[in-house]
Amino acid sequence: MNKKHIVLSSAMAGLLVFSATPTTFAHDMFDDAFVEKGQEGSQALNEIPVLEGTKNVGNWNEVGSAQLKKYDGVQNNTADVYAYDGYAYVGTHTKNGGEGGVRIFDLKDPSNPVEIAKFADDIPGTWQEKVIVKKVNTKEFKGDLAVVSVQQLNRSNPESKGGFLLYDVSNPESPEKLGFWEMDKRVPGTHELYLTVKEGKPFVLAANPYADLLTHGEEKDFALVDVSDPSAPQTIYEFDPRILPEVDEDFDGYNWNSPDGKTRPVFNHSTMTDNNGDTALLSFWDLGTIILDISDPYNVKFEGRTDYAPDVQGSAHSAALAKGGNVLIETREVYNPTKEGYEESYGYTRIFDIKDKQNPKLLSTFKTELVDDVEDGVTFANTVHDPKVHGNTLYLSHYAGGIRAVDITDPGNPEQVGVYNPAGGYFWGTFVDRNYVLGSDMNQGLKVLQKNNSSK
């Protein structure tokens, strides 16, 4: 891929100098309406616990709860959650100085989750949001492979570095470090990632926000990495938005002169694939959800992307697939509901038909009662966050709005069928594991819900 020297405006150059100090983020760190994640000012939204359900979650209930262990007297808070082979893997955010690593919980008894290990905390001055675990069988490694995103708390810390770690978790009680994919020191690191296995070969899809901007185009915000040998990961592809006709050749990596006349923020926030690892979804903020054909990882092809009306903030944050990969779920993390020139609204979910991936068709939107509460000002409390799909049910983590269950049997007419929100809850992520729904509560740790025995 051609590397281009990007000339920054004087205003942006000044901003980059300023941001050389602490740069922890989980959203747009260059947004003027900067606000950190956490529950400040949002307690009143969920003082009363809520547990409601109809249809296929009519009888769901909380069966287990476990706060993260303290280490050296430090209480970290949760980030995302993932389940594999009877264990929950919980990432950590930045509370009390980060460095919380990934926590492994034994779920043999879902009513009593037990934290059995902490790993991926070996790089100073970092936090570990995302973890994915899958079985891998290559010449170089055979076993259960965990990949963990690593982000710098402060890029001026000479000991910190960003990228992603690779661990052998075949024995969950004793994870072993295998390797590290390291990014340019100027970049905060890998924010979210995904691990897919194609014909026995493992690949990591890494979302590295601001890499394009901060390295002047030397590195890009999305990288596809061959991790067949976890001790020596190899980058095989990077996505360059400048290949799109609507993106100017002199794009600086962040400020996009959109065809609607606005200058919109662009960076890769997260990424995932379909079950076969043939289609990659890149959440590229105001550039929408980018759809790539990665059926041949060494010959990646751009297929299409979602877009927005001129009065809609993009903020494409995360994605999920439904209906055999023909339906795309796009969550939008809008935390400033009164941004000039846009509709007054917090982030809500959009649902697309992508049978024709070159032309995604918007089928519907799903909004909670929090979305229009714009008087609350700049806050994460009211916006949607991450989506997960299990059959015909969409599960959404919604910060102070808890976990929402949405029936998408008819994707053009989504219907909320369940709400779980314990008093004081503030949910980063959710994951469906067998007959259980897991939630990572930034305040209270790991939550375990039992849902109905339903095939839906």
Image (cartoon, rainbow, N blue to C red):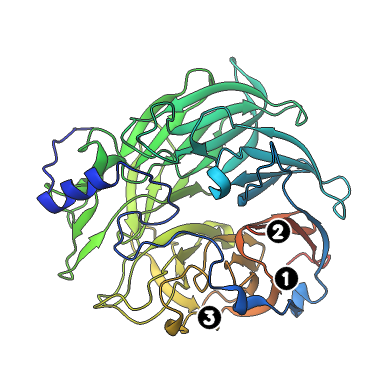
Q: Quadrant of residue 161?
A: top left
Image spot of residue 329 (x, y percent) = 50, 64
Instruction: Provide the residue designation for mark 3.
Output: 370
Question: Vertical placement of 426 versus 138: above or below?
Answer: below
Q: Which of the two labelled residues, at mark 1 and mark 3, occupies the earlier sequence position?
A: 3
Whole-number angstrom distance, CA of label 2 to CA of label 1: 10 Å
Q: Are marks 1 and 3 in contact (CB under 8 Å)?
A: no
Image spot of residue 271 (x, y percent) = 46, 48
Judge the density around disc 3: few (<14), some (14-19), many (≥20) Cα neighbours within 10 Å.
Answer: many
Q: Residue at x 44, y 72 (%)?
A: 347
Mark 1 or mark 3, which is nearer to you?
A: 1
Judge the density around disc 2: few (<14), some (14-19), many (≥20) Cα neighbours within 10 Å.
Answer: some
Q: Secondary structure at mark 1?
A: loop
Q: Secondary structure at mark 2?
A: loop
264 sits to left or right of 164: left
Whole-number angstrom distance, CA of label 2 to CA of label 3: 22 Å
Q: Which mark is residue 444?
A: 2
Question: Vertical placement of 408 versus 256: above or below?
Answer: below
Q: Which of the two labelled residues, at mark 2 and mark 1, occupies the earlier sequence position?
A: 1
Whole-number angstrom distance, CA of label 1 to CA of label 3: 16 Å
| Residue type beneath disc 3 | Leu
Of 238 and 151, the residue lying toward us: 151
152 sits to left or right of 201: left
Q: Residue at x 65, y 43 (%)?
A: 74
Q: Which mark is residue 106?
A: none
Q: Residue at x 52, y 28 (%)?
A: 123
Q: Are marks 2 and 1 in contact (CB under 8 Å)?
A: yes
Judge the density around disc 1: few (<14), some (14-19), many (≥20) Cα neighbours within 10 Å.
Answer: many
